[in-house]
Amino acid sequence: MARCVMVLGTTSGAGKSWLTTALCRWYARQGLKVAPFKAQNMSNNARVVASANGSGEIGSAQYFQALAARAVPDVRMNPLLLKPEADTHSQVVLLGQVDQALTRMPWRERSAHVWPHIAQALDGLRADNDVVVIEGAGSPAEINLMASDIVNMRVARHAQAQCLLVTDIDRGGAFAHLYGTWALLDKADQALIRGFVLNKFRGDPALLAPAPAQLQALTGIPTVGVLPMWWQHGLPEEDGVFDDRTQQHGAVTQTVAVMAYPRISNLDEFQALKNIPGLRLLWARTPADLGGLKPTDWLILPGSKHTSSDLAWLRTQGLDHAIAQHAQQGGAVLGICGGLQMLGEALIDTHGIDGNAPGLGLLPLVTSFAQEKTVRRMSAQFAHMNGTWRELSGVRFDGYEIHHGQTQAHTAMHAAGDVAHEVIAQLAWQNKAGNVLGLYMHGLLEDPRVLRALFGADAPNLDGVFDGLADFVEKHMGITLLGDIISL
């Protein structure tokens, strides 16, 4: 069975996903067969991967971790995915497939039902690999959840994993977080903690003394790494909108504004835009955020886990008028998946999947929500394009679909001659003026062929990003420590 190292965190956002990804690449570079694992992830950022049923969903973080490990992503790497649709409700995806029964089940009752699947997935990965790098969720010391834990210490005990506990020192209170987390664990679980890691440190590490030594005296656990703050590492953020510290390279010649609605999904696909010379990536929450936007600038309506409620949010914020005004002035508008659905005339929901709503009316299309969910990877090629998007004519790209809705021409508008130009059969449409484009496939702005066509530039290769992460942890944690964790 594979040796297991697990990355736990004192809080969400401490750096678990980032460090797990770096360790996946580091161990893979030692010639080992490596796989990532996270028992349960809560995120609307998902990717389509192989499953027993053909295709399934896992969290984007585990997808990138698999690539970092030089492994083929599969649903065992994230057997349980929770996709929030409201503040108190999430769609449950088990081994890549939506499970309606689990979705309806109360939170604490799910554990007994899902744990056998989680254990089987982890055991399968351990049987197939030399090393499994496991990521925890939130904090392992949530004492209200310990009895129903299926993602932190229960997983660590099952795998007898060597655990690292990471904290975000930039937030303050790092040593209290580390000590408090350790102190709330059972003795048997405390024994699995191999080392503490301070993440996002700014300043001279010598100033930390004598705290690491004092913490070790209290717990018996050494601080094994102090990782400096690193903003531009190139790895997509797992949760929430990208930090607002996006830095463009050189003078700004173009702005791309992404609507940051509450149920935004698959936002990681815009990571490449952060690295295009002269491009500023902006996250828009109010019309004021769009002040000064030029017709040559873009507005993007990204994916949404709940299209009708995010569309209502756009209207409440007044962003619907700002989007319409930009389009009327000839400005570029791109809708992806849920964003495409919003650009149409109407959302029709007869199954209680998402909700009914009038659309923004920028494309003469109607979306009907179906109970069956489309989940697949695919390659597509644009037909002839005009206007803003003409550079995409004939360009082939790889992407993926994750959606319930099915979209088609508005019958009455089509009969009256108001026809959307179908540029990919049943997947992408363009308005007559050529400045509004909607498509179902995610991944457009990650494909190097598309980036070259639209910007004449290449984004950093992901493989290089993963190697950079591995170099970083090797420098700041050390080869000996990283090897010793799994007894290399």
Image (tube, rainbow, N blue to C red):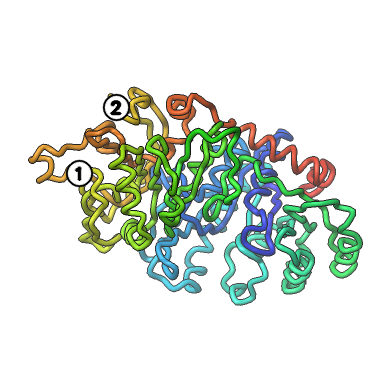
Rendering coords of residue 301 (x, y %) = 38, 47
**Foreground pick, 206 / 293:** 293
Q: Quadrant of the C terminus?
A: top right
Residue 268 image point, x, y percent: 51, 45
Marker disc for residue 385: 2
The label on residue 139 is none
Q: Residues within 10 Å of mark 1 (few under 14, many from 20)?
A: many
Which of disc 2 and disc 1 is earlier in sequence? 1
In the displayed orientation, state which residue is furthest to the bottom.
144
Q: Is 316 placed left or right of 118 in the picture?
A: left
Near mark 2 (Cα within 10 A), the count class, few <14, some 14-19 or many ≥20, is: some
Q: Judge whether 328 appears above or below 87 on screen.
A: above
Contact, mark 1 vs mark 2 (Cβ under 8 Å): no
| Residue for point 36% across, 27% down | 392
Residue type at mark 2 is: Met
- Whether residue 406 sits left or right of residue 250 in the image: it is left
User: Along the line of sight, which residue is nearer the eye, 338 or 66?
Assistant: 338
| Element class at badge 2 | loop
Residue at 85% across / 51% down in the picture?
204
Q: Circle 1 sits in a helix, a strand or a loop, which is it?
A: loop
Q: Which mark is residue 364?
A: 1
Q: Position of residue 402 (x, y in %)?
A: 37, 47
**Quick check: 248 above or below 194?**
above
Residue drawn at the location 33% of the way across and 42% of the way down: 440
- Residue 95 in view, yes or no: no
Q: Residue at x 35, y 46 (%)?
A: 337
Cα distance in 3D space between marks 1 and 2: 17 Å
Quadrant in which residue 22 is drawn: top right
Name the one closer to the observer, 314 or 286: 286
Amino acid beneath label 1:
Pro
| Residue 81 pos. (x, y %) | 48, 57
